[in-house]
Amino acid sequence: MQRGASIFSSMARADATISIPENIEGYDENSQVPCVLLRDEGELQKRIHVIGSHDLSLDIIRDMLKIRHPSMEFLSTHTGSLSGLFAIKKGISDLCTTHILDEREGVYNIPAIKKYLEHIPCILINIAKRMQGLIVKKGNPKGIKGITDLGRDDIRFINRQPGSGTRFLLDAQLKEAGIDKHNIRGYDREESSHTAVAVMVKESVADTGIAIYGVTKIFSLDFIPLVEEDFDLLVTKTFTEDERFTMLIDLIQSKEFKGRLDSLGGYNTKETGTIKYVNG
């Protein structure tokens, strides 16, 4: 009964339930399992669900979509860029957000799509270019100047989860700087969003972490820029024929959306809404 509150909370968010017989431990991935819907099918069709990387732009999309189309619901699950790509590959989702840098080519997302989604028709749309950097407390009390400082004994770092674009970025930066990840205090401490990293720094749980510029304004932190990267939306060709895609792309290409991103700071919206790549 100690877990009762969390169970009820999960039930409140669930769309369906499944029953697992006592004589089996569970179902294998991709198994077809009967379920009982907790919501009307029509309600589920009024939902846009994105899986992948986290960004403040997703909150703006959620807010604007609700205003423009009150019956619609926008959900984002922050599992990291690579998990988002695999969600599309496995047919779990039609949309994912991603910012995976290919070290060899110096290109974001397209090489990863070619590698993991070779035969899946989809299009890549730019949401925005954004600044990623090290975030620190106001005044930068530890005097952190860049990636090389992460190897200092007095610096506590907070990382992002494996498979996230930010984790790929960190590892590439460490490799370039010749820093052994095992020498970083906190490399194995992980959070799943930029805001979670910012909270850890704000509350002095960590001295620094990598996050987008936008969260520094929210939490009154300082920012040490590292790179400008592409934050993109990957959409299956099937979903582009759905009316929900029209709602989404019209919103992303609107002046209002670009204006709201610009007001956050740390975003470059010159290519926002443009199709960068067509796969398959």
Image (tube, grey):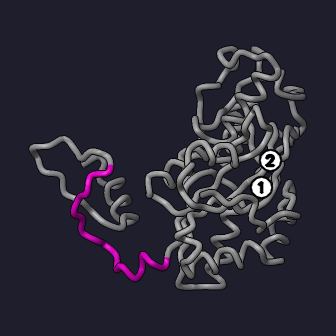
Residue 229 disc label: 2
Which residue in the protein does label 1 denote?
218
- Eyeballing the image, is 92 above or below 114? below
Q: What x and y, as percent, mark residue 262?
A: 86, 64
Q: What x and y, as percent, mark residue 258?
A: 82, 70
Residue drawn at 59 percent across, 26 percent down: 188
Q: Is residue 36 magenta?
A: yes
In the rendered picture of this protein, how many numbered marks are placed on residues?
A: 2
What secondary structure is the magenta-colored segment mainly?
A: loop
Q: What x and y, as percent, mark residue 266?
A: 86, 54
How dense is the environment of label 1, judged by Cα within 10 Å: few (below 14), some, or many (20 and up)?
A: few
44 relative position to 278: left or right: left
Secondary structure category for the residue under label 1? helix
Residue drawn at 75 percent across, 14 percent down: 153
Measured in 3D between alpha carbons, the distance from the residue under mark 1 to the one under mark 2, in whole angstroms, is 20 Å
109 relative position to 242: left or right: right
> Amino acid under label 1?
Ile
* Residue 212 visible in the shown view: yes
215 relative position to 32: left or right: right
- Eyeballing the image, is 151 above or below 8? above
* Residue 135 visible in the shown view: no
Residue drawn at 82 percent across, 49 percent down: 213
Q: Nearer the viewer, residue 273 or 35?
A: 273
Q: What x and y, as percent, mark residue 156?
A: 71, 25
Q: Which residues are magenta?
A: 30-46
